[in-house]
Amino acid sequence: MSGQTCRVATIADLERPDGLAPVRRALGVQAFGVNAWTAHDAGAPLIVAHTEEPDGHEELYLVVAGRATFTVDGEEVDAAAGTLVFVPEAGTVRSAVAAAPDTIVFTVGATRGKAFRPRGWETDRDVLPALERGDYREAERLLLNALDEYDDKAYLNYNLACTEARLGERDAAFGYLRLALAERPGYTQYVRQDDDLAALRDDPRFAEIVGG
């Protein structure tokens, strides 16, 4: 059922091959970030190790089914179905793996005191497969379309720089790279090692942008 008063879906219906159920995008949620992650095999990753910097999100995780092992700043948390794991500090490193088959973790996040803004990583599930199979024109199309959807454009601009570099479009690649680093200077650490940007490294603009 779908309409102005109610939108209904199941996690299973929304689940993609990589285990992500993009709840926020599928239901059109605008007030907070919300998704679900499923791992069908014990030992499979559910939540990749990450922080919520610089966005500052608090995150709440609910184990809906199965059992998960969370690692929060190096401390393991055994989480059976029904367990809530709240990580309030954005700089805390957190991750989770399935400790039982068919484990589902539901996640909710937002920044306290600020209006929620969707983030560009949501494009990963479409863009990264295109990049991996070398379909750079399709990746370019998806990223350009996403620029109007998200406020945090650094991630999108970085991937556009990688895509344009692979396509041999150096001027465009440097343009997007400058935009990405202006918003997120911390990306510099990835620029020096990213194979997607290898074609740019012999250009004087590369050293100018990344500082040597």
Image (tube, grey):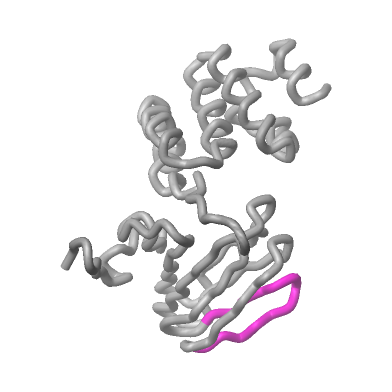
| Residue at the extreme left of the image, as rendered | 1
Asked if residue 76 shows in the view, the reply is yes
Any magenta on residue 71? yes
The mark total stands at: 0
Q: What span is colored magenta in the figure? A: 68-80
Q: Quadrant of residue 8?
A: bottom left
**Mainly helix, strand or loop, the magenta region?**
strand
- Where is the N terminus found, in terms of image quarters? bottom left
The x and y percentages for residue 6 are: 23, 69
The x and y percentages for residue 136 are: 42, 27
Against 30, residue 189 (above or below) is: above
- Taking the image as shown, residue 202 lies to the left or right of residue 108, namely right
From the viewer's side, name the closer residue of 24 and 171: 24
The x and y percentages for residue 185 are: 73, 36
Any magenta on residue 120? no
Against 92, residue 65 (above or below) is: below
The residue under the point 62% across, 61% down is 113
The residue under the point 62% across, 31% down is 180
From the viewer's side, name the closer residue of 79 and 147: 147
The residue under the point 75% across, 73% down is 74
The x and y percentages for residue 23 are: 37, 62
- Where is the C terminus found, in terms of image quarters? top right
The residue under the point 58% across, 32% down is 158
